[in-house]
Image (cartoon, helix red, strand yellow):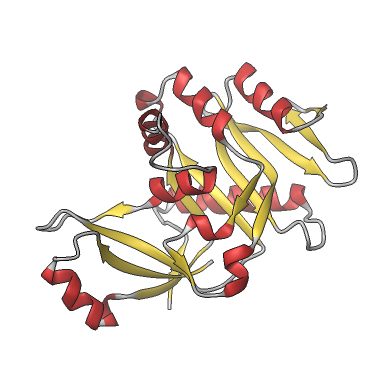
Amino acid sequence: MNLIRMHRCGNVNCLSQQKESIDDSNRTTFTRRVYQVDATTICQLIKRNENKCLYKSFGQLLYQASIDRIETACNHQNDDLLLINAPDLISVAFHWNSSECTTSDVEDFVSIIEPFINLRELFYDVTISDARIKQLCLIGLICFYGNTIEVFFSYEHSTSKWLFCFDGNVTVANDWNAVIRKCIDFHLQPFLLIYANSQQNPVDISQLLKRTILQEKSNHNNNHNGEFFH
């Protein structure tokens, strides 16, 4: 993902925001390999969304959870991301704090995941018209089982079914609802979602999962967010 980080203020009377809107030097262009979200923040938003005022889709929920709040005098500024390309594949990583999330929270989290996502909803805005209409489909799901990453689901395009890989065994889940049920029954915590453009050639999901896990572990060990500044 090629991105621009920009400061935005929700207060139209903010003098600092008016000054920054004239000067674009505060915008930073960079590349991010993984879309990262705090799972605790998502669980909190789910609890607050009883009237569906905060979000209406999983993509909107991810965006709300990813917004960085900036400590400023006016307390209305956000650190927002502008997408400047239209990727055909996006990996979404979740960071869990087990002490802050209950079993019920995890079940609510799993139940709200959608097998498709609108690219536009993940960002404050996009600059390419194709990104405004592009929809990506879920092809892979990696989960925590206990404190280790041992479980993953992969979508099989030829059969339109999901493969469930656990403890060296592979079983078939007939549809997305069956995947959700297995996650809840096995008390799995989603760690990584992989969405891809279904119009493109099928992705080798097994190799992609291996590369993405290694990259995410490397980022975690190096305290690095997978960002490369231009």
86 and 204: which is toward the camera: 86
Q: x and y percent of residue 29 in the render?
A: 41, 75
How many marks on residues? 0
Q: Extreme right residue here?
A: 158
Residue 192, percent from left and from top: 58, 43
Quadrant location, the C terminus = bottom left
Left or right: where 219 falls relative to 212? left
Residue at left offset 16%, top offset 53%: 75
Quadrant (top left, top right, bottom left, bottom right) of the N terminus: bottom right
Using the rendered view, name the quadrant where residue 98 is placed.
top left
Q: Residue at x 32, y 75 (%)?
A: 27
Residue 34 relative to residue 24: left or right? right
Query: Which residue occupies the foreground of this view, 115 or 182?
Result: 115
141 left or right of 34? right
Quadrant housing residue 169: top right
Place of residue 126 in the rendered image (x, y in percent of width and height, measured from the top left): 49, 69
Residue in view at x 31 percent, y 54 percent: 68
Please determine whether, in this image, residue 80 is positioned above or below residue 29. above
